[in-house]
């Protein structure tokens, strides 16, 4: 039998949103996104974006997470998708990892997209190119014939990630900033 305190604590804990990695918490858990590291261009882009963003990443763009976003955008482009698909992927990684290639997360989740073990091996899920490709493949499965182009960015991201219903809105909250990041890196 649970004590009143334990029962109240469990009820409160279960009602809280899942732990979402804040941008200021990722540095010690981040794996590289680019072998050569962030570039001077990434540093300059981060400065530009910090003046534009209004959501979770506001004032938190740095050369590292800009390099991670750049890898995502380049992978989306090479895969034949457009800048809107890049924004969908970026909205997802803002929510999931604060645009950091994490070596851990909730349960067995890792990488930029915080993909579970069912998505692939640890090495695959922490490879930004592979993880982005996998995200795009699942997006294409859920939205065949490019129907994702006519669905709200946050709704597409939530459909691919499949969070609990009460957390689906988080991707839409970051959609505006995701578009700004994707646009800045696409050009």
Image (tube, rainbow, N blue to C red):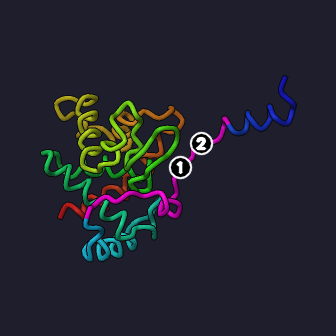
Query: Which disc is residue 69 wearing?
Result: none
Tag 1 secondary structure: loop
* Mark 2: few/some/many CA within 10 Å (<14, 14-19, 20+): few
Q: Residue at x 52, y 42 (%)?
A: 106
Percent coordinates x, y for residue 33 in the rendering: 31, 58
Q: CA distance from mark 2 to mark 1?
A: 8 Å
> In the image, is residue 183 above or below residue 127?
below
Q: Residue at x 73, y 38 (%)?
A: 12
Q: Which residues are magenta?
A: 14-35
Question: Which residue carries the number 1 mark?
Answer: 20
Left or right of residue 163: residue 111: left
Question: Which residue carries the number 2 mark?
Answer: 17
Q: Is residue 172 magenta?
A: no
Percent coordinates x, y for residue 21 in the rendering: 51, 53
Q: Residue at x 81, y 34 (%)?
A: 6
Tag 2 secondary structure: loop
> In the image, is residue 146 above or below residue 176?
above
> In the image, is residue 67 above or below residue 155?
below
Callout 2–callout 1 Cβ contact below 8 Å = yes
> In the image, is residue 97 above or below residue 41?
above
Left or right of residue 77: residue 175: right
The image quarter in which residue 2 lies: top right
* Mark 1: few/some/many CA within 10 Å (<14, 14-19, 20+): some
In this rendered view, identify the residue nearer to me: 82 or 11: 11
Query: In which quadrant will I find the C terminus?
Result: bottom left
Q: Is residue 31 magenta?
A: yes
Q: Residue at x 40, y 67 (%)?
A: 61
């Amino acid at each position: 039998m649970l004590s009143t305190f334990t029962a109240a604590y469990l009820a409160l804990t279960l009602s809280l949103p899942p732990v979402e990695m804040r941008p200021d918490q990722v540095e010690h858990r981040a794996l590289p996104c680019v072998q050569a590291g962030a570039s001077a261009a990434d540093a300059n882009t981060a400065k530009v974006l910090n003046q534009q963003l209004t959501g979770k990443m506001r004032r938190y763009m740095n050369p590292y997470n800009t390099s991670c976003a750049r890898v995502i955008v380049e992978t989306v482009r090479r895969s034949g998708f457009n800048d809107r698909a890049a924004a969908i992927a970026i909205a997802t990684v803002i929510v999931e990892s604060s645009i950091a290639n994490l070596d851990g997360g909730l349960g067995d989740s890792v990488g930029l997209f915080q993909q579970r073990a069912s998505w692939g091996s640890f090495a695959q899920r922490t490879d930004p190119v592979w993880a982005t490709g996998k995200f795009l493949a699942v997006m294409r499965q859920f939205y065949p014939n490019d129907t994702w182009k006519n669905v709200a960015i946050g709704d597409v991201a939530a459909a691919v990630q499949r969070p609990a219903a009460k957390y689906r809105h988080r991707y839409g909250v970051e959609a505006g900033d995701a578009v700004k990041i994707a646009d800045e890196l696409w050009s």
